[in-house]
Image: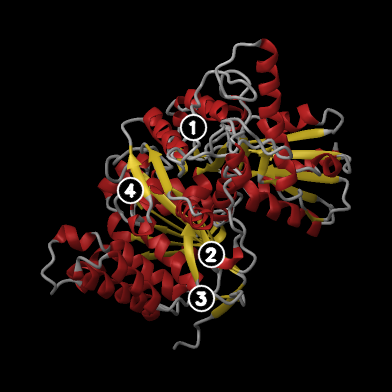
C-alpha cells in the first residue's frame, strides 16, 4: 500500500447513488445498506425516484436517487452527502446540490459524452467546471468500459453487461468505506438466485469495482465507519412497508386470528400487498381487489367473519374508502386501514412524501364517525405500530387508521428480529360464556368499563345476529330512528374511543425536558426533529422534544406535557394540521408552527434555523 494512502475513522457517512431510473441505483443503495447493517452500523435511507415509469434516458426528469447514512447515532439519511455517485451528467446536475462542501464526487466518465451533456442541458463541454466542482474532490472512473472489460469473456451481450454498471460502482464504494464483499455477494446471490449467469457476472463486476478502488487508493482516502455494539440478536435491514406487513403477521399470531388483506395497488403502499401475498405459508390471505372500495369492503366482510382484517392504500384511496369506514364505525368492527401518505391533492406527487392526510383521517367521513388514528415514527417502528394498530382495533372493536408515509414506507433502518415473547397477547373481546348461557346477549351488548361491543363471530351457536349501516337500538341492535337513542349511540361510540387513552403509552419528553421550548412532531419526521433538538441543545439552546405516535385519542398526559412549556413548536410536512388538532384541544397553549409541503422530508439544518428564529422572537 502506498505511503500516501490514508484511512480515516469516522462516526457516520452519507452516500448518495444517482443515475437513470434503469441504472439500478436502488439496488446498489439497498445492498450497501444491508452490508453496513450487518456490520453493526445504524442506517437510515431515502429512496428518491421519479413518478414517471421511464423518462427518456439521460434526461433530467428521469434521474433516480438513493441516499443512505450509516454509522453511529444515525437518525436521518442526512441533509447532505459525503459521497455522490453519478452515473451520467443528468444525475450529477440534479444531485450536486445534495453534496456537502468538500465531499467526493464519483462519476462514470464514459457517460459524459457531448450527446449526454446536451440531454442534461449543460451549456458547456466542461460540466464539472460549470457546476463548480473541485477537481481534488472528483473521481472520474471509466465505469462502463471497465464493466465491459470485466465481462468480456462471459458471452453476455452489451445490454446485459451495461446493466451491471451499478454493481461496479457498489464495489468501488465498498472499497472506499472498508465494507467486506462477502455480505454484498450474499445479497446478489439472493437477488439473482434464479439467474446464475447474471449472478456470476455481477459478482465479477463487484470485485472489479473493489479492485479498481484499491489500485487508485493513492488519490483518495478510505474510511472506517464506527459501528455500535448492538443488543444481541439477528439484525436485518428493513423498510417501513415490509415492517408494516410483518407487524400485521405478528398481530395475527398473537391474537389467534387469521390475517386478511383486501387491497388495491397504489404508490407508495403496494409493497405491503406484495409482501403479504408471499406469506401464504403463515396463513395470510392477501387479495388484490378491483378497486379501493372493494378492497375495504372485502376487509369489512372478513372482519365480520372473525378475521384480523386490513386494507392498505394511500391518500386518494383513503378518500374512496370513506363511506365504508363509516360502516365499520357504525357496525363497530375491528379494521386496520394503512395509509402510506404521498404528495397531493388528487394524483399529486405519487412518489414523494407528505403528511397531508391527517385531517382526512380524523374527519373524512360523514356523520359522527370517531376512530383511532396512529402513526409510526421510523421504518422499524412501522412493525410496532402495525402491531399496536391491530391490537387496538381488535381489543376495542374499532377501525384504526395507521398513517405511514412515503419517506418511512420506502426508507429503511437496521432492525433486530424480535423474540416471540417480546409482544403481548391480543385478546379479542369474545361474548362472555355466562352472558351467552343466560340468553341475555344482544349484538350491541358491551363491556361496562370499556364500552367495547362483544365480538360474536358468525356461525357460533346461539349468537346469530345482524349488524349494518343503519343506526341501531342501544340494547337490542335493532334498527332505530329514535332521536334520543341516536344521540346516546353517538356518545357511546365517542366515549369508547376516548377510553383508549388509558390503553396507550404516555407522551414521552426527550432531550432537555426542563427547557422553555418544546419541539413537537408526529409520524415519519421523528429522526429529523430528534436530531434537530439534540443539535439545538448542543449549541446551548435548550430544547425539549415530544413525538406523537398516538393522535386520536391523544395520550392521557398530553395536556400536562404541553402546558409545561413557554412555547410549543409543531413541525410537520403539511400546512399545520397537527398544530390545529392540538390547538383545538388545548387553546391555552402557545403553539407555533414549522411547515414544509415540497414532497421532501425536513432537513435538520432548516429545522434548527427556524426553531432558533422562533426562539429569538
Q: Nearer the viewer, residue 554 or 371?
A: 371
Please state the horizontal and vertical placement of residue 316, each as a whole percent of the image.
45, 29
Q: Position of residue 73 (x, y in %)?
A: 65, 65
Mark 3 = which residue?
A: 39
Label 1 SS: helix
Under tag 3, what secondary structure?
Answer: loop
Residue 270 in view: yes
Q: Earlier in the sequence, mark 1 or mark 3?
A: 3
Where 410 sits versus 421, above or below? above
- Residue 384, x across and y down, in percent: 58, 55
Give the total of numbered labels. Answer: 4
- Earlier sequence position, callout 1 versus callout 2: 1
Q: Residue at x 22, y 60 (%)?
A: 162
Q: Nearer the viewer, mark 3 or mark 4?
A: 3
Contact between labelled residues 2 and 3, with CB atoms less than 8 Å apart: no
Determine the image quadrant of residue 53. Answer: top left
Query: Mark 1 near mark 3, Cβ–Cβ under 8 Å?
Result: no
Where residue 52 appears, as percent x and y from the top left, is 34, 38
The alpha-carbon separation of the residues under discs 1 and 3 comes to 37 Å
User: Disc 3 and disc 4: Cα gap in Å?
Assistant: 29 Å
Q: Residues within 10 Å of mark 2 (few under 14, many from 20)?
A: many
**Disc number for residue 315:** 1
Instruction: Name the residue rendered at 45%, 34% in the picture.
Output: 300
Q: CA distance from mark 3 to mark 2?
A: 13 Å
Among numbered discs 3 and 4, the one appearing first in the sequence: 4
Write down the residue under mark 4.
21
Q: Which residue is mark 2?
A: 415
Q: How is the image coloured?
A: secondary structure
Disc 1 or disc 3, which is closer to the eye?
1
Q: Nearer the viewer, residue 251 or 549?
A: 251
Amino acid at each position: 500500500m502506498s505511503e500516501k494512502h490514508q484511512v480515516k475513522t469516522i462516526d457516520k457517512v452519507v452516500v448518495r447513488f444517482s443515475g437513470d431510473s434503469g441504472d439500478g441505483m436502488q439496488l446498489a443503495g439497498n445492498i450497501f445498506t444491508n452490508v453496513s447493517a450487518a456490520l453493526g452500523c445504524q442506517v437510515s435511507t431515502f429512496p428518491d425516484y421519479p413518478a414517471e415509469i421511464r423518462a427518456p434516458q439521460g434526461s433530467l426528469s428521469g434521474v433516480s436517487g438513493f441516499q443512505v447514512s450509516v454509522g453511529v447515532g444515525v437518525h436521518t439519511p442526512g441533509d447532505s452527502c459525503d459521497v455522490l455517485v453519478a452515473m451520467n451528467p443528468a444525475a450529477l446536475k440534479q444531485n450536486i446540490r445534495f453534496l456537502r462542501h468538500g465531499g467526493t464526487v464519483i462519476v462514470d466518465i464514459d457517460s459524459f459524452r457531448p450527446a449526454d451533456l446536451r440531454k442534461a442541458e449543460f451549456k458547456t463541454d466542461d460540466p464539472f467546471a460549470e457546476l463548480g466542482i473541485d477537481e481534488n474532490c472528483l473521481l472520474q472512473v471509466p465505469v462502463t468500459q471497465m464493466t465491459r472489460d470485466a465481462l468480456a469473456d462471459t458471452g453476455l451481450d452489451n445490454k446485459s453487461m451495461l446493466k451491471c454498471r451499478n454493481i461496479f460502482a457498489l464495489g468501488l464504494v465498498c472499497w472506499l468505506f472498508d465494507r467486506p464483499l462477502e455480505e454484498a455477494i450474499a445479497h446478489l446471490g439472493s437477488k439473482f438466485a434464479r439467474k446464475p449467469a447474471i449472478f456470476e457476472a455481477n459478482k465479477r463486476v463487484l470485485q472489479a469495482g473493489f479492485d479498481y478502488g484499491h489500485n487508485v487508493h493513492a488519490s483518495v482516502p478510505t474510511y472506517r465507519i464506527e459501528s455500535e455494539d448492538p443488543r444481541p440478536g439477528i439484525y436485518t435491514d428493513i423498510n417501513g412497508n415490509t415492517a408494516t406487513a410483518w407487524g400485521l403477521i405478528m398481530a395475527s399470531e398473537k391474537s389467534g386470528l387469521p390475517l386478511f388483506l383486501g387491497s388495491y395497488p397504489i404508490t407508495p403502499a403496494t409493497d405491503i400487498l406484495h409482501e403479504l401475498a408471499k406469506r401464504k405459508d403463515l396463513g395470510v390471505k392477501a387479495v388484490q381487489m378491483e378497486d379501493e372500495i372493494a378492497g375495504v369492503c372485502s376487509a369489512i366482510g372478513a372482519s365480520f367473519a372473525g378475521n384480523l382484517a386490513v386494507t392498505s392504500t394511500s391518500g386518494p384511496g383513503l378518500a374512496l374508502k370513506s363511506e365504508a369506514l363509516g360502516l365499520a364505525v357504525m357496525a363497530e368492527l375491528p379494521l386496520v386501514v394503512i395509509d402510506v401518505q404521498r404528495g397531493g391533492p388528487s394524483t399529486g406527487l405519487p412518489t414523494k412524501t407528505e403528511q397531508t392526510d391527517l385531517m382526512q383521517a380524523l374527519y373524512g367521513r360523514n356523520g359522527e364517525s370517531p376512530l383511532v388514528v396512529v402513526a409510526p415514527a421510523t421504518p422499524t417502528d412501522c412493525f410496532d405500530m402495525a402491531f399496536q394498530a391491530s391490537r387496538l382495533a381488535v381489543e376495542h372493536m374499532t377501525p384504526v387508521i395507521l398513517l405511514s408515509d412515503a419517506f418511512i414506507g420506502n426508507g429503511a433502518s437496521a432492525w433486530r428480529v424480535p423474540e416471540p415473547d417480546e409482544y403481548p397477547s391480543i385478546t379479542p373481546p369474545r361474548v362472555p360464556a355466562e352472558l351467552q348461557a343466560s340468553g341475555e346477549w344482544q349484538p350491541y351488548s358491551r363491556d361496562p368499563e370499556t364500552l367495547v361491543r362483544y365480538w360474536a363471530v358468525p356461525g357460533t351457536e346461539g349468537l346469530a345476529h345482524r349488524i349494518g349501516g343503519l343506526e341501531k337500538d342501544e340494547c337490542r341492535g335493532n334498527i332505530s330512528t329514535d332521536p334520543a337513542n341516536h344521540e346516546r349511540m353517538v356518545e357511546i361510540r365517542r366515549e369508547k374511543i376516548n377510553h383508549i387513552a388509558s390503553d396507550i403509552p404516555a407522551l414521552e419528553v426527550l432531550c432537555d425536558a426542563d427547557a422553555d421550548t418544546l419541539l413537537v412532531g408526529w409520524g415519519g419526521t421523528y429522526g429529523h426533529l430528534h436530531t434537530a433538538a439534540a443539535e439545538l441543545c448542543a449549541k446551548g439552546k435548550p430544547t425539549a422534544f415530544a413525538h406523537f405516535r398516538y393522535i386520536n385519542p391523544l395520550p392521557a398526559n398530553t395536556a400536562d406535557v404541553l402546558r409545561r412549556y413557554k412555547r410549543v413548536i409543531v413541525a410537520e410536512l403539511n400546512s399545520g394540521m397537527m398544530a390545529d388538532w392540538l390547538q383545538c384541544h388545548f387553546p391555552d397553549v402557545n403553539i407555533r408552527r414549522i411547515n414544509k409541503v415540497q414532497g421532501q422530508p425536513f432537513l435538520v439544518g432548516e429545522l434548527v434555523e427556524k426553531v432558533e428564529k422562533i426562539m429569538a422572537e
